[in-house]
Image (cartoon, helix red, strand yellow):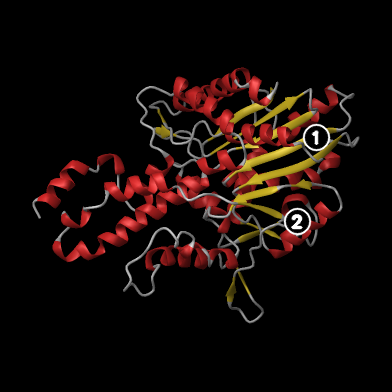
Amino acid sequence: MNPSNELLKQIYSLSFSVNSASNLSWKQTDCKSGMVEMQAYIKKVAAAVLSETASIIGNWKAIWGPIVYANDPTSTSVHADNTMGMYYNSDENVMVIAIAGTNVNSPFGWFVEDFSVHTTKSWETVTGVPSSGNISNGTYVGLSILREMKNSKKETVTAALKNFLSENPSLTGMQVAVAGHSLGGALSPTLALFLSDTKSDWDPNGMTSIGAFPTAGPTPGDEAFASYYEKQIAADKIYYLSQHNAIDVVPHAWQKEDIEKIPTIYQDYIKQPSDANPAETITGTLASAAALNALATKNIIGVPVNRYQQISPSTTLDGTFNTEMDDKISEKLKYINLVLPLALGKYAVYLRNLARFAAQAAVQHTSEYHKLLDIVPFMAEYEKILKANKPKEQDVLEDYEYAVKEIAKIDLQKIDEAALTIAKDNH
């Protein structure tokens, strides 16, 4: 499998398309209606995407899903924790399995699937292959969810793939591309490896080839897992193309050499006070917490160590610092020191810089990839589809606004710039 640039753009477009429920939630009082509405919304958007963007990405047909999963489906407010869909293009003879990234308002996605890396699970327990390394507990949980998700016919995605091949015996040479961004960037290579290791179960006649197309993914497993994976790549059992933005924080987790780069990733643009020592105190603290969380095993004398290692090769893309958005936040928070208690005023610059860091991290992890992956035309149409189908009475924050609200605890939409200017004029 060696896709053309045009096919790559189609694969990435479908990968991003399954994130339609991000930042949304559905209320329910009967333990089920919200789930039904959310699933209907996901399918409605997917159908609109396939029909209204065909001139951009070609003719794709939904074979399975997309299906949405909620860890707590009976709560009074439900949201998507995982979403996955499978699509086929007869012109290309390609099947794409698209896996959504972390939903920004999913605590389960963040704290279990993304951040649960302090323990690992043996890959052998997943596919039975010995000496194949370990994956993080979060990746294991996410992969288990994907494997168990079922459509209205009670088919898992693997069963649907097997049935599709059985019903279409002439499709020899079909390519199966597994793609995902962010959380999907960790789950897509693991699902692709699962399909490869269990291929005799769903493709006994060897009709397909498998490819993994993760973007912006955190490290899914340890050095032994990476080594096993790379052997499968070398043996042509999996085509592997991983891409990440050099100034995206997320792919810097969880390999220790990469975590060390997080505090200073934007140091050329976000300057700390000259007397700050160490300079990147707050971001360094965040990175230290991440590094501590990644101590998943112990060495021979019992000392906790970090053995996470990214799968190679991985292509680095050169993202561009978003100065326009950064200037907007800097201006909005320019005079916050004047409305803080006197003793806290000296911390205003650090709070402002934390907000700038969080916002930049969000942009570099999301919209910057639209340019880097050359899918801007698709994403423009996709945003129109989302806007046209947005559930009623749902306020959707921009990704950078949500990041600032969650990390710096500042609601940018409630900052009154005019009032801060008055404070400055009367200071």
Relative to 342, say whether 93 is above or below.
Answer: above
Separation of marks 1 and 2 at Cα, in angstroms: 26 Å
Circle nearer the viewer, 1 or 2: 1
Residue beneath disc 2: 124
Residue 415 position within the rendered picture, expressed as x and y whole percent measured from the top left: 24, 43
- Residue sitting at 80 percent across and 55 percent down? 129
- Which residue is the site of mark 1? 175
Compare marks 1 and 2 and give the one earlier in the sequence: 2
Q: Residue at x 16, y 54 (%)?
A: 339
Query: Where is 130 relative to 402, above or below?
Result: below
Q: Could you tell whether 273 is left or right of 153 in the image?
A: left
- What's the residue type where badge 2 is placed? Glu
Is residue 382 or residue 287 the one in the foreground?
A: 382
Q: Is residue 132 visible?
A: yes
Q: Nearer the viewer, residue 282 or 394?
A: 282
Q: Amino acid at mark 1?
A: Gln
How many callouts does the rendering have? 2
Tell me whether the residue at label 1 lies in contact with that at label 2, contact meaning CB atoms closer than 8 angstroms.
no
The spot of residue 90 in percent (x, y) is: 78, 23
Q: Badge 2, how many Cα within 10 Å: few under 14, some, many 20+? A: few
Quarter of the picture containing the N terminus is top right
Residue 268: name its quadrant. bottom left
**Is residue 149 shown to the viewer in this render?**
no
Q: Give me the residue at 57% from left, 29% from top.
A: 377
Position of residue 87 in the picture relative to residue 285 (left or right) = right
117 relative to 163, above or below: below
Tell me the quarter of the picture where residue 30 sits: top left
Q: Could you tell me which secondary element the residue under label 2 belongs to?
A: helix
For residue 332, above or below residue 157: below
Residue 269, position as x, y percentages in the image: 42, 58
